[in-house]
Amino acid sequence: MNNRKSHKFLAGALACLVAIVAPLFSEDSLPSGYAGVSLGMSLDATKQALKRDPQFGYRGDRDVSLLPGDSRILIETDTSITAPHSFLDRCYFQFYNEKLYIITINLRQDKVDHYSVFSSLCKKYGNPVSLTPQKSEWRNDSVIMTLERPLTIKYTDKAVFESLIDQSLVEKTGRERNTEKFLDGL
C-alpha cells in the first residue's frame, strides 16, 4: 500500500513538472525585431533593411533625425503615402551609440485589431509576464516586447534600456525613495 502511494505521488509530481516545463519548450523565443530589422543593428544596416522592405514606407535619409542627447538617432517612417497596402502605419527606430535599441511599430487599426494581435502573440510566445488594460509585456534576458493600446508593438533591447535608465539624471521622488527603503527592509 505504501508503495502504491509513493507511485501516485511520483506520478503527480511528474505531471506537475511536465505542466510547468513543457510551455518553456513549446513556445518560440521572443523575436528581437520584425521583417529583417533587429535590435542591435547598426544605423546603416537598418537603413538598408528598411529600403529592402516596402511595407515600412522608408523614404531614405529624410526619415532620419538627430535626437537631443548623446548619440541618439531616430528613423521615423510613415506608410500612408508610400505603402498604403501595409499593415504598418508609423514606425520608429531609435538608436543609441549607432545601435538600434527600440523598434516601435504602429499597426493600422482598419486592417487588424488588438485582440487578433494579442491572441497571435500569446499563441506564439505564451502568456505575457505583465498585463494591464494599456499594455501586455513579454520578456526574456535580452528583449522586452510589448503590445500597447490602441495597436502598437514595441521591441526593446533590455540591456541598453536598463543602462540608459541607470544613467538617467532624473532623481527619484520622495515616495520612490521611501518605497525603495521599505522594500529593502523586507
Image (cartoon, helix red, strand yellow):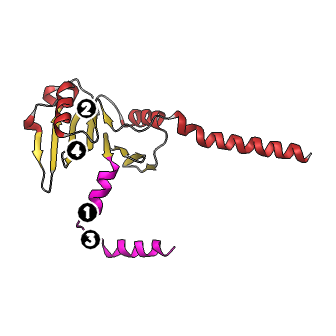
Residue 33 lies, in percent from the top left, at: 31, 36
Q: Earlier in the sequence, mark 4 or mark 3?
A: 4
Query: Callout 1, which amino acid?
Result: Gln
Q: Residue at x 59, y 41 (%)?
A: 21
Residue type at tag 3: Glu
Q: Which mark is residue 88?
A: 2
Q: Which residue is mark 1?
A: 167
Q: Are marks 4 and 3 in contact (CB under 8 Å)?
A: no
Residue for badge 4: 99
Q: Are marks 1 and 4 in contact (CB under 8 Å)?
A: no
Nearest to N terminus: mark 1 or mark 2 = 2
Please state the horizontal and vertical placement of residue 155, each as a whole percent of the image: 32, 42
Q: Nearer the viewer, mark 1 or mark 2?
A: 1
| Residue drawn at 26 percent across, 38 percent down | 106
Q: Is residue 116 left or right of residue 170?
A: right
CA distance for labels 1 and 3: 11 Å
* The N terminus - image quarter: top right
Separation (CA) of disc 2 from disc 3: 37 Å
Residue tagged 3: 171
Residue drawn where x is 16% and y is 34% of the image: 47
In what element is the residue under mark 3? loop
